[in-house]
Image (cartoon, coloured by chain):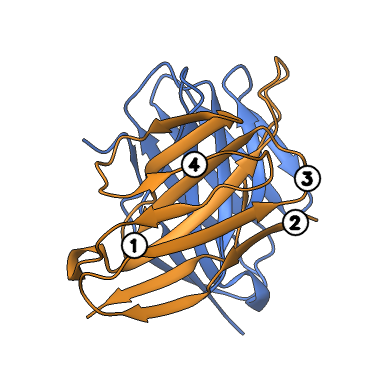
Amino acid sequence: EADIYQTPRYLVIGTGKKITLECSQTMGHDKMYWYQQDPGMELHLIHYSYGVNSTEKGDLSSESTVSRIRTEHFPLTLESARPSHTSQYLCASSRRWTTSGRAKQFFGPGTRLTVL
Amino acid sequence: DQQVKQNSPSLSVQEGRISILNCDYTNSMFDYFLWYKKYPAEGPTFLISISSIKDKNEDGRFTVFLNKSAKHLSLHIVPSQPGDSAVYFCAARSMRDQFYFGTGTSLTVIP
């Protein structure tokens, strides 16, 4: 089964604080993703990475930043949290896509962020 | 603009009957489709997938059907079990190797 971890699972924090959401996977996957999801809404891709030192912004504009210094680690940082950042943040990883097209994403348990 | 749509936010089915979850998409360049299952306070878990070159894929109680001309896919669960109660997301892969998700359908299987 997938081994992808996110910490913290829940975070309540005041406006203006800097936060880092951690995501790690032990499967050696090249690709990693961050999604944002609100209740009843679709998962929105906010960042992705195809490998070390590769990061791209997703379709949903986000004030967060990411880094990929190690294959297994893909942290997301908010420099100054605001109430509008309140959401669930899901991290995922997958193998490099193959012509067989059988790659799928493995998701972490998510971080529920509340900014007061 | 939402490229993957699940128009039914919820569905209730009796145990033992068939559950049919539907998904529509707009981008004809999607080449791979997936269904994920999500329990509260957990991340989505992969359920079943289908390539755009196929029209059906079956895995145990789960079958996914793809109708490319209608840009429609569906997930059939038969027989439905109470443990199947969860939110189901469909997703589609783009040429840029990004995944687009629907808003989810909450399935309740009534014992």
Please identify the quarter of the rendering in which residue A5 is found.
bottom right
Measured as percent of width and height from the top left, residue B80 is found at 65, 67
**Disc 1 + disc 4, Cβ < 8 Å:** no
Q: In orange, which chain?
A: A
Measured as percent of width and height from the top left, residue B104 is found at 41, 57
Q: Earlier in the sequence, mark 2 or mark 4?
A: 2
Dot 1, crowdedness within 10 Å: few (<14), some or many (≥20)?
Answer: some
Q: Nearer the viewer, mark 4 or mark 3?
A: 4
B14 versus A23 height, above or below? below
Measured in 3D between alpha carbons, the distance from the residue under mark 2 to the one under mark 4, in whole angstroms, is 20 Å
Q: Tell me the kind of residue under disc 3.
A: Met
Q: Nearer the viewer, mark 2 or mark 1?
A: 2
Q: Nearer the viewer, residue B16 or A55?
A: A55
Q: Tell me the kind of residue under disc 4.
A: Ser
Measured in 3D between alpha carbons, the distance from the residue under mark 1 to the one under mark 4, in whole angstroms, is 35 Å
Q: Which residue is mark 4?
A: A67
Q: Nearer the viewer, mark 3 or mark 1?
A: 3
Q: To which chain does the residue with label 1 belong?
A: B
Measured in 3D between alpha carbons, the distance from the residue under mark 2 to the one under mark 1, in whole angstroms, is 30 Å
Q: Which residue is mark 3?
A: A27
Q: Which residue is mark 1?
A: B9
Measured in 3D between alpha carbons, the distance from the residue under mark 3 to the one under mark 1, in whole angstroms, is 33 Å
Same chain check for tags 1 and 4 = no
**Disc 3 + disc 2, Cβ < 8 Å:** yes
Kind of element beneath mark 3: loop
**Disc 3 + disc 1, Cβ < 8 Å:** no
Q: Nearer the viewer, mark 1 or mark 4?
A: 4
Measured in 3D between alpha carbons, the distance from the residue under mark 3 to the one under mark 2, in whole angstroms, is 7 Å
Chain B shade = blue
B26 versus A12 height, above or below? above
Dot 2, crowdedness within 10 Å: few (<14), some or many (≥20)?
Answer: few
